[in-house]
Amino acid sequence: MAVDDFLHSSQHPLLHSNGAHAHNTNNNNKNIIFVSLAKWVLKVTMWVVFLAWVIFLFLFPTDFGTGLYDDWVDATSGTLFGETGSVLLLYSGPIIIIAFLAVPYLLLSGEDQLQVKEKKTPRFRLWTFPVLVDGPLGVVSAAELIGIILFIVFVIWAVYSYTVVNFEILPSYGDDLTLEEKRVFMLQMSAYSFGLIGLTCLAFLFLPVARGSILLRLIDIPFEHAIRYHVWVGNLTMFLLTLHGLCYMIVWAIRGIIPSEIIEWKSDGGANFAGVICYVFGLLIWVTTLPPVRKRYFELFYYTHHLYVLFIIFFALHVGDTYFSKAAGGIFLFMLDRFLRFWQSRTNVNVISTTCYPCGTVKLVLSKPGNLQYNALSFIFLRMREISWLQWHPFSVSSSPSDGKYHISVLIKAVGDWTEKLRGKVSEESKIELPFQPHSKILASVEGPYGHESPYHLMYEKLILVAGGSGISPFLAILSDILHRTKQKKLSVPRHVLLVWAVKRSNELSLFSTNDMKSICPSFSNQLNIEIQTYVTRESEPSLEENLVHKATSSSAFSISKGGGISVLVGTGNKLWAGSYVIISTVGFVITLGLLNICYLNPFSISYWWYRGILLLACMVISVCIFGGLMVGLWHLWGKRTSARGEGDEDGEKFNMRQHIEGVTDEDLSLGTFAHSYFVRYGCRPDFKEIFGSISDRWGHADVGVIVCGPPTLQSSVAKECRSQSLKRRSSHPIFHFNSHSFDL
């Protein structure tokens, strides 16, 4: 009986387990199909909404488009929200709808996208093929060039269409007009047309600078790359608004009414004086963005840019609620991001350890909660209140997510006043504090981390990393991430990596010692091939004290409870909370605007343009502060509760970090012991034609990812060679995909 009981109890669960496994497999297959179908439906819907919006923008300047607009306004103006609601839905609605749909799409998307299921044929990609490599715009990809052409075509088309319409309505001003009067009326109508076109561009202006925007996450373009789009659109917008104002000034000068028109504050039309003030603020911002001013007087550029608040306020006063609604979508998403950044930056972040290097670079290790995720190619904005209460500076992250759940590292090179003061403070603290004792003074404020939605460096089986000076920082994170993934036997990992690093002095080579790569995955050589080529451009031969150069003077300390970790309140953080924040805030805006119409605007027949414009802006601010603030509070509580569960692991991680810092030897810091192939050349620069030609012969037919972090000249040189090699390649040679990771304000 005992044997029978044993067989009965042991065999049946096994049979049940096999059946359950098959059942789970079927369920998983069904889930995969459902997820793929749901993502496809969401993607198609977003594309339809976006294309319909773009088509409408192109049609609006024509008689046909104006007729459609008038029919829409007539059909919907009798609703609770009136004409303002109609224009909001037509112009800003598509942006918000896409943002809403992006939330479930991002939730359904994950790292499964990186899993390599089959070997694909190498092919060109619009986003990674550089078309323009020299010029004022820098390196421009094929996709970016298409976007630029579309904007230029739109502006030319809109000017042409409005001019045709203006000629058609010119007789309505009277048949007895003289030629000069006709010219004045045409100039006046052209001024109005330039304003409308500039207003359309303004609808796009704030979208790229919302650092944690759900839209940037959707298209997987980080803020450090999108900032150039803000610059381009900003220049175009201010150029059009300048034409708008200049044409009106010429008309008023001809009629001799400049003083009276400038100070006029209409109630049933645009408030001219508010428009003049708005333009003055915009002009100050525009002038300080010019490269000669921005590079020489960066602080002036930085502080002047904060005048955007006054620009938006007087813009609302100038155009009123109906016209402001056309640009409200992008402005609202920017306000949401700015509000979230404000709350994240209020947290005092502990500096766990600091390290000074002979080349003038400082490494900071910052505390973060375990539930704050980031990718290897991320960056943060850092403020040290002991140095400046107002200055924020962006830095690439030098650690990978696998280096530790509770810390994040950055390398900061002393090249300006702020960074020099930081290095001085760290050096001063190292003389006072005992090693591995709590810092009593060094606290930081952090915004971020920001970066790509997915780690795109894992898309390529073969990778070329090109760094200039401190541009090595993000590549240390990439190498660490690849080694950790190799150790964990993950599928989507590059198998061939070439690092090309150009430095001015040999003492900069010590930066490679910031991470102990060899200890991460000691047996990686059978699975991963890493080559390192280093060029020391301003030294003709090795230093006599080369061995000493590679050593770092370290001042490390573990934090106390005076501060905390980086706040989880970041738009690139938890997808569910970030999406809910956008959705609830938008719903709150609709509720606030509805209450305003019910309780005040409609009963009292408020019709002043400028007044309704500022009230619409106030509704946006109130909804962000109240409804968005509620979500921020709940998000913060969730972050504290989930991060508190890992406090024991955090203590263990700090202990391991201490052991790591104490145990690093000179041999561990050597580049030669880490890479399969390593050399240093003195007194020369990388010959990218030779390097890429050699790679083409050795790596064969494949997609090769090229990531560059360095000055514009370095980016241009690498992009030029990528384009040349890809266009002239043989069928057996690789296609080089250019990616830039340089942050340049």
Image: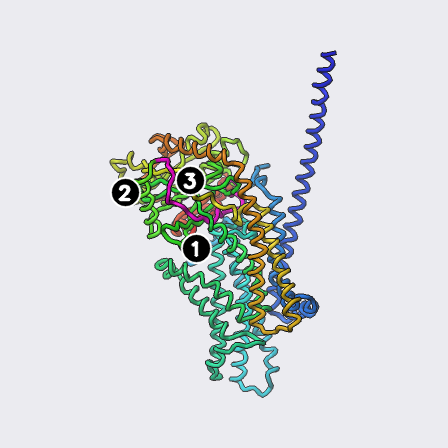
For residue 539, the mark is 2
Q: Nearer the viewer, mark 3 or mark 2?
A: 3
Of label 2 and label 1, which has the lower sequence position?
1
Which amino acid type is shown beneath numbered disc 1? Gly
Label 2 to label 1: alpha-carbon separation: 29 Å
| Residue at image coords 42%, 62% | 304
Specify start and end residues of the magenta stretch as a single range.
Answer: 435-458
Label 1 to label 3: alpha-carbon separation: 45 Å
Image vertical order of residue 186 relative to residue 338, above or below: below
| Residue at image coords 62%, 47% | 105
Q: Residue at the far bottom: name it.
A: 176
**Within 10 Å of the Cα at label 1, are there few (<14), some (14-19), or many (20+) other Cα atoms?**
some
For residue 440, the mark is none
Identify the secondary structure beneath mark 3.
loop
In the image, residue 34 lies at what x, y percent? Answer: 68, 42
In the image, residue 445 lies at what x, y percent? Answer: 43, 49
Q: Tell which of 105 and 48 is nearer to you.
A: 105
Q: Name the residue under label 3.
A: 560
In the image, residue 594 lies at what x, y percent? Answer: 65, 63
In the image, residue 389 lies at what x, y percent? Answer: 40, 54
Q: Does the magenta stretch include residue 548?
A: no
| Residue at image coords 49%, 79% | 261
Which amino acid type is shown beneath numbered disc 3? Ile
Q: Residue at the far front: name it.
A: 562
**Within 10 Å of the Cα at label 3, are there few (<14), some (14-19), or many (20+) other Cα atoms?**
some
Which amino acid type is shown beneath numbered disc 2? Glu
Q: Name the residue under label 1.
A: 138
Q: Tell which of 550 and 587 is nearer to you.
A: 587
Of label 1 and label 3, which has the lower sequence position?
1
Residue 452 visible somewhere in the drawing: yes
